[in-house]
Amino acid sequence: MTPRSGVMRAKRQGPRPLPLHLAAAALTSATSSPALALWKSGLLPWSGPRARAAAELSDALADVDPKAFASAVERAARARLGRFMDGVQTYRRHPYRRTLVDPPCVWQDGAVRLLDYGADLPAAAPALLVVPSLVNRSFVLDLSAGRSLLRHLAGEGVRPLLVDWGKPGPIESTFTLTDYIAGPLEGALDATLTLTRGSVGVLGYCMGGLLALALALRRQNDIAHLTLLATPWDFHADLALARRVAAALPWLNLITDSLGAMPVDVVQSLFFALDPYLVTRKFEALAGLDRRADAVTAFVALEDWINDGVALAAAVARECLAGWYAANTPARLAWRVAGRVVDPAQFTRPALVVVPAQDRIVPPASARALAHALPAAHSLRPALGHIGMVVSNAARTSVWDPLATWCRAQASA
């Protein structure tokens, strides 16, 4: 067995894109005092709850020395910037490195590998072809020894076979989504069917859920059931995000067409736009923790995955951004794979749709739309986030165990 492709050995680059996060933190610090002056002069255009909160704060500060308060604001802003920088250094200097090794690779097509996490299980054990996103490394589903959905499923008698997309090589760099689905993804399904004698289900996570759905529709006779984790469908459930992507398309297309791919830092910039200060808050909090604590190690392990992203092939990037986000092609039944509309109403086998209630990346309304469109779908709605549903302390009881139970039940049905 060999070390997994996601192991980070070089100096950490994150949080990526670092210049963007540094600028956001520095800008917050530099503009705190000017913002205070604007607020006091009534020039900030607040309304609704923000206006009421501002009025309450103004009343509370009525007897406070304005100069002393302004000085306190400036000190607090500098302290926050300092904590953010301390958190970044804590992360970048942390000794943790992921040491898990790959399970056996049982099939490969170009950069795409199929990893068998249940190779020691009986051939009749229910198998699960696991399809992660193209934009992030697959090892989030096998993050560490204690935070591995795939190893947990294997321990519960379900045989997970993971599609590890790897980094796009010369061939994959020319791919469309159809090329991925009708090519290596179907090849991985064929390999899974050859290896196993029990039922075969398909699981997709996030973007991988859309690929898994398209595969399931193409090969419905070979698939016993479908599981979709935090999978978007109605991309206009959050119109603000869709409009931002649409507005950014000209420069995104310029970058992608010039380079032949959408670089990792550009992809990460899109996630940044969802919550520009999320990373700042996370790293400020990290600075206050004991660097030897298990929580810090868990933080570093997850950040290593977040920052070890994968560039998207140019055609795939265009299809996802212009098609899915801007034009909402899935929900409008306008997304086609190999010329065929991807219509969830045509998948009549059992489906489990997991919709994390605290998901900020895939709005729950977007994922619920897919649950409503599948004729034989059951829903699970854990009180977790998009990533927390597969790696958090609560994931085992909220998602992992119910998923294992579901797979075993479908195999015996």
Image (cartoon, helix red, strand yellow):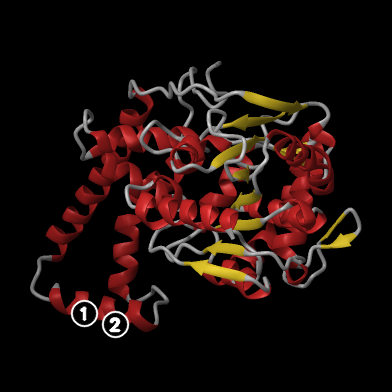
**Farthest residue toward the right?**
339
> Eyeballing the image, is 240 above or below 86?
below
The three-letter amino acid code for the residue at tag 2 is Arg
Label 1, on which residue?
Answer: 56
Q: Nearer the viewer, residue 136 or 79?
A: 136
How far apart, in angstroms, are the residues tagged by discs 1 and 2? 6 Å
Q: Quadrant of residue 348?
A: bottom right
Q: At 38% from the left edge and 26% from the top edge, which residue is drawn? A: 92
The three-letter amino acid code for the residue at tag 1 is Glu
Does the residue at mark 1 contact the one at mark 2 (Cβ under 8 Å)? yes
Secondary structure found at label 2: helix
Label annotation for residue 340: none
Viewport quadrant of the N terminus: top right
Residue 75 place in picture, x, y as percent: 20, 48
Label annotation for residue 52: 2
On the rendered structure, is 350 left or right of 388? Answer: right
Residue 84 place in picture, x, y as percent: 32, 40
